Structures are given as structure tokens and as C-alpha cells.
Image: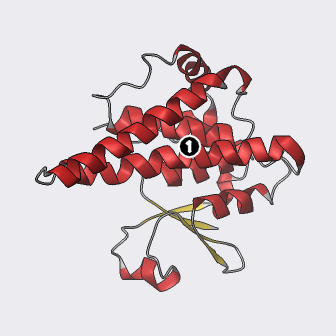
């Protein structure tokens, strides 16, 4: 398998972390490529990362689909519960974590542009989404495990991205339970081995 990636992408990190947790990361070649590269557009019409090319040549995108595919192979315990409340909890947590990323990645570009009222309102709206999401995660932090589901892995990657790109907006104040959980899982292989580059 080949995974199109950027080392700074939290969406790629989530996929890679899932592969590590399931013990299949050794079967994946990391293909470092930019989103403007024609070679990526040739396999993914959206020209986005992550993109996964499976062993039989099937192309999958983007991160939720890739993570579920990775969960379908290998022998380790599943990250996607098969059914019932546990499944809905895990995939809703993953969606909430992805929502944090969706609200923070574009904001990096916006703050670099001239600030008019519309842009300031947009930035504030995205910040509010992240704040509400963190409060929701704080409320359920006591139930979070040791990166045993796709939701927990996604949450870990989202918090790591906030540390990586927004250290000037610390998320830990006001979220002591979430902070304690993150400190417990940060050194586990799925997160430790996928840490974004410094600087």
C-alpha cells in the first residue's frame, strides 16, 4: 500500500496512527507529495492528502474512508466497533475531532491575509467551534481509553495539531480532564511515532 502524505498533515497522521495501532504500518509506503503535484491529481481528482493506494490498485480518500479500510485488514482489535452505541460513539468522536481540524486548518491561511470585518467574523466563528468541541471532549474525557478506537486516535491527533499550529492559543486551561487523558496517551506508539516535525 502507498499513502500520499505530508508530515505536517493531521489527517494523514490519523491514518498513520490507525495503521500503527493495528500493527500494519510496515505494509504502508509513505509517499511524500504535494497537493499541487500532477502525480497526485492523476490518482485522486481532488488532489488531496491523505490518499491511499491499496495493494490491488484501488484508490481511497480521504481520511475517514482510509481509516475504515485500514481497520478492515490485519488481526489486531478493531478501531471501529462493529455496531451499537460503541460504534456511534467512536465515529461521532472522530467526526468531532475532524471538525476541530476543519475549523483550524483554513484559519491559518485567513490570519495571514488582510483583516476586514468578514474575515475577522469567520475566524471568530471557527474559534468558537473549537472552543465548544473542546468543552464537549472535556465532558466525556473520563470515558476515553488508550487510543482503542478511531475516535480516540482522532482526538489525540486533533489536540496534537492544536499544540503544533496554535501554541499561542493553549487548549489546556479549562480542560483538566482532557489534558490528563492526553498526557497519558501522548507517548503511546500511534501518537509518539507520528509526531509532526518541529518548527
Q: Residue at x 81, y 46 (%)?
A: 87
Label 1 sits on residue: 97
Q: Residue 93 location in percent, x, y?
A: 65, 41
Query: Which image quadrant: the N terminus?
Result: bottom right
Specify the farthest residue to the bottom.
42
Residue at x 33%, y 74% (from the top left corner): 36
**Which quadrant holds the C terminus?**
top left
Q: Residue at x 49, y 34 (%)?
A: 132
> Where 82 sits versus 73, above or below?
above
Rendered location of residue 78, percent (x, y): 82, 47
For residue 52, above or below residue 26:
below
Q: Is residue 167 left or right of residue 112?
A: right
> Going by the image, does 32 lie left or right of 50?
left
In which image quadrant can residue 196 be found? top left
Which is nearer the eye, 42 or 26? 42
Q: Secondary structure at mark 1?
A: helix
The answer to whether 26 is drawn above or below residue 128 in the figure is below
Q: Is residue 145 above or below residue 99?
A: above
**In the figure, is residue 102 to the left or right of 117?**
right
Q: Position of residue 58 (x, y in %)?
A: 67, 79
Name the residue rendered at 58%, 59% in the picture.
Answer: 63
**Callout 1 crowding tier (Cα within 10 Å): few <14, some 14–19, many ≥20:** many
Amino acid at each position: 500500500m502507498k499513502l500520499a502524505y505530508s508530515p505536517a498533515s493531521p489527517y494523514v497522521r490519523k491514518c498513520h496512527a490507525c495503521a500503527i495501532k493495528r500493527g500494519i504500518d510496515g505494509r504502508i509506503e509513505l509517499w511524500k507529495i504535494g497537493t499541487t503535484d500532477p502525480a497526485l491529481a492523476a490518482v485522486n481528482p481532488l488532489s488531496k492528502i491523505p490518499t491511499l493506494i491499496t495493494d490491488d490498485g484501488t484508490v481511497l480518500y480521504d481520511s475517514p474512508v482510509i481509516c475504515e479500510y485500514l481497520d478492515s485488514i490485519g488481526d489486531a482489535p478493531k478501531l471501529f466497533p462493529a455496531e451499537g452505541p460503541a460504534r456511534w460513539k467512536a465515529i461521532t468522536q472522530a467526526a468531532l475531532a475532524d471538525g476541530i481540524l476543519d475549523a483550524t486548518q483554513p484559519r491559518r491561511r485567513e490570519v495571514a491575509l488582510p483583516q476586514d470585518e468578514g474575515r475577522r467574523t469567520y475566524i471568530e466563528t471557527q474559534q468558537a467551534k473549537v472552543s465548544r468541541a473542546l468543552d464537549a471532549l472535556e465532558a466525556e474525557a473520563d470515558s476515553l481509553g488508550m487510543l482503542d478506537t478511531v475516535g480516540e486516535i482522532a482526538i489525540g491527533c486533533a489536540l496534537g495539531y492544536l499544540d503544533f499550529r496554535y501554541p499561542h492559543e493553549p487548549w489546556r486551561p479549562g480542560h483538566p480532564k482532557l489534558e490528563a487523558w492526553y498526557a497519558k496517551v501522548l507517548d503511546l506508539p500511534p501518537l509518539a511515532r507520528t509526531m509532526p516535525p518541529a518548527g
